[in-house]
Amino acid sequence: FEDFMRKNNCDKYVTVGICGSFRKHYDCICNEITIFENNGFVVTVPKKDTVSKEENGFVIFVQDGNLEPHQLEQNYLDQLLESDCVFVCNPDGYIGSTVMAEIFVMLANGQEVYFLCEPSEQVLKTAIKFHGADNIIMSSKELCHMMKSNNEVFGWREWPDAYVQESNLSFKR
């Protein structure tokens, strides 16, 4: 992965995390993963997998092993936060409580969040408006186009303590 990042260090958008209701929209989520990957982006989470079981409304995949739902959710949030942006797969507007919590964490941490459809939950619409997000409803193909366009325009990738531009590394002081 480090080699990949080094090779692509001039792009603002390399990775995308996807969230949505695995119980209701997992097939759609898998289709969105394919679209992002076919456009050259790395999907940090989720990985395509077989559902192992459902526990109290929480979908557990084969690759999850014996981790408890709260551990799985923490790992998922960590990987979403490491993504360059997050895409919410909500084909009918439905979000659900777990995904809504994930979105609130992303917004509170300044993460870029985009939606396939307008969320049906009013509290989420209010939170998005509060955070000043515009033009956030789009298909994954539109988001891929936007990310590619921004990569061409910016030609740099933000880092907490440094920036890389045309192979020159400069540290902020």
Image: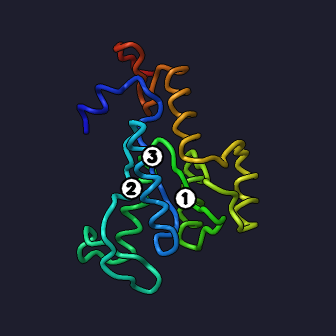
- What type is the residue that disc 3 sits on? Ile
Numbered disc 2: secondary structure: loop
Label of residue 35 in the image: 3
Mark sitting earlier along the chain (3/2): 3
Q: Which mark is residue 52?
A: none
- Residue at 28% in and 33% down: 4
| Callout 2 crowding tier (Cα within 10 Å): few <14, some 14–19, many ≥20 | many
Which corner quadrant of the image does residue 101 belong to?
A: bottom right
Q: Amino acid at mark 1?
A: Cys
Along the polypeptide, which appears first: circle 1 or circle 2?
2
Real-space CA distance between mark 1 and mark 2, rounded to the nearest whole angstrom: 12 Å
x and y percentages locating residue 41 in the rendered image: 40, 39
Q: Tally the marks.
A: 3
Given contact means CB atoms under 8 Å apart, are the residues at marks 3 and 2 in contact?
Answer: no
Residue ID for mark 2: 45
- Point out the image quarter for the C terminus: top left
Residue closest to the eye, 171 or 164? 164
Q: CA distance from mark 3 to mark 1?
A: 12 Å
* Circle number at residue 89: 1
Label 3 neighbourhood size at 10 Å, few (<14), some (14-19), many (20+)?
some
